[in-house]
Amino acid sequence: MGYFSASSLSEAAQALTVFIKGDGRIRLVVGAFTAQGDVDAVREGLRLKEVSDRIGAEMVDAVTGVDDELFQHRFKALAWLIAQGRLEIRVALRPNGIYHDKVGIISDEAGDAVVFSGSANESAAALLPTQNYESINVFPTWRPELAAWHEPHRESFERLWDNRSRGTVVIDLPAALKDNLLEVAAALDAPPDSEREALIAARLKARDEQEAASVDADARRPRPPATINGMPFQMREHQRQALRAWQANGYRGIFDLATGAGKTITAIYAVVQMAKGVPGLTVVIAAPYQSLADQWCEILEAFNIRPLQCYVSKDLWHDELQRRVLDMQGGSDAFQAIVVVNRTLRSPEFQSLLARVPKTRLLWIGDECHHHGSAALASSLPANADYRIGLSATPMHYLDDERNDRLKAYYGDVVFSYTLAQAITDKVLTPYNYYPVVVPLTADEADEFISLSDDIARAFVREDKSSGPPSAALTALLMKRARIIGSAANKMGALEHTLAGKQPTPHALFYCGDGQVDLDGIEEGDVADEGQPMRQIEAVSRLLDGLGWKVSRFTARESRRDRDLILEAFKTAAIDGLVAIKCLDEGIDVPACDTAYILASSRDPRQFIQRRGRILRRSPGKTLAHIHDYVVVLPEDAHDESGAARKLITAELKRVAEFSGLAENRNQAYAALRPILTAYDLEHIL
């Protein structure tokens, strides 16, 4: 062998206990480094002791201080064989370099032998199959046709052993190493045996695997980031208060935090802290849409959490989720994170696997949890989750008590609220100016609105109030009337007037309705051929294009990839604005946005509260946001015998009151609306 080393002993010497048991005998020649002058002196019979002592000291150093239990057992086997005279070691010296031949001869009692030679060094890297690529040639002596290959090796070894090789000097085992080995052997009560060695090896392997698993688990353990979005990470006081309230409520409850106040970060920080105290914690996060799920995954990565994404295609997650659930059931301490969209949540495949997660390990987080108040989704929420967090800026529905009851039955009560006013005061959100723009309906729109309002009033009288949600017929009437307000034709002229004389500015949002705009007879804004209706979003896009704005639509029609590209272009100001319908209502972060034009809004406070939150998120260089709100009223000459005008204005003013109440320019907003408020005796609303 090339040289004497601890690593070679630790790996190759595992056969020594077998030699002890089988009465085997070994002759071993090892190489050693030395200078040419030393070799010449030894050849001439000079300085043999000096050279031997130096080489012996180096060999002793190679094996001294190695505290590996398996190595020590094998070293004792080496020592025992030396003491019994069954292992002889000699050292080969070369004038330059090292004796590096790798040749072995193994013979049995019948005289048959195998001879091998090859490239493998005497090191762990060379001997272990998982490391170096090495090869050897093996020649069995009982095959006469191979005699020409193996006989030279056998003869060469005998010459070497007898110190008859040209250019190589062979000396006996240095006294320093031999004395060390004999001392070790003298302390043995019995020869080392292979059974004990196997037990030691198995125990050490199990320990190493456990340590490796522990290291791997630590590497995968959730932890807070040093920075997030380029800023030092730090939990805000309101977020800590929310978590304390949740803990005090038995780890259940709803966080009613203003949009942009950090609901996601608060929940993920709860995951980080829970993972420390709950071995094998499994967190499942349900988001209403794929875009929100992607956003969750991105933020989780910052906390060293790499979730399984259970959406897009079942083929991409089902088998892996099944494997993880089996690990959980088997008591694995590995932390698990899963992100699912509501549509997948309801699937039988996901429900079946979710039900098998041990309840004492399951933390359920419902993002935009107000969706989970619906009968269909409420029945899909995991009853086996001991820990539950609901997140929403608008958890309770303003009309549907049954929905609210279902939500609280699962998550518990709202345990912490943090209002928009508090967020602005604490500088968590950006202050804003509010600009209401009064938009009268056209004569035709007003007539249709009043007629629909009368039909709706009669339908309400006929409806059984205790039978649940409105009938399909009533719902259709309500939607048709809402589209008239959302897509009012005069909004196009009002928007053009707002933008007149202004240069396009980046980071603007334009919220549109899903109805059509009938532009017949409307002169302002040449955005369509006369008499040719088009969807409002198309009309707005064409108007903006004509004014020199670079905008992209952001609707349900765009693919996931297109949306990602559009949002990136928006963030980098490659485009000026987004023209959206509903896709930006919930959750999606566009903090750079500082201006919104609300051309359509439902009466549901949830929608306009969520939309306002989109605009107020903090971003570098953003000190003030701007909201332009197009408020629909009936024209002064409308025949409003049923009081539809007053009802319409009252409904619209609920949003206006909400927006203007916290605006920096609330007095200016009031002044813009005062003529309408005075005309209908509604000044008390603002």
Image (cartoon, rainbow, N blue to C red):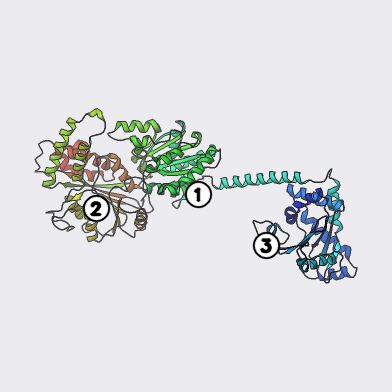
Q: Kindly identify which numbered label has been placed on residue 567.
A: none
Q: Quadrant of residue 407?
A: top left
Task: Report if the CB atoms under discs 2 and 3 are less than 8 Å apart.
Answer: no
Give, as a three-letter code, the residue at label 2: Ile
Q: Residue 390 location in percent, x, y?
A: 40, 37
Q: Single out the mark in the foreground, 3 or 1.
A: 3
Q: Left or right: 228 with respect to 256?
A: right
* Residue identifier under label 3: 134
Q: Can residue 276 be seen?
A: yes
Give, as a three-letter code, the residue at label 1: Ala
Give, as a three-letter code, the residue at label 3: Glu
* Residue identifier under label 2: 537
Q: Single out the mark in the foreground, 2 or 3.
A: 3
Say what secondary structure mark 3 lies in.
loop
Upstream in the sequence, badge 2 or badge 3? 3
Distance of label 2 from label 3 (alpha carbons): 69 Å
Instruction: State the residue lying farthest toward the right.
Output: 45
Q: Left or right: 490 with respect to 198?
A: left
Say what secondary structure mark 2 lies in.
helix
Upstream in the sequence, badge 2 or badge 1? 1
Comparing 468 with 60, the one in front is: 468
Q: Residues within 10 Å of mark 2 (few under 14, many from 20)?
A: many
Q: Quadrant of residue 396?
A: top left
Distance of label 2 from label 1 (alpha carbons): 42 Å
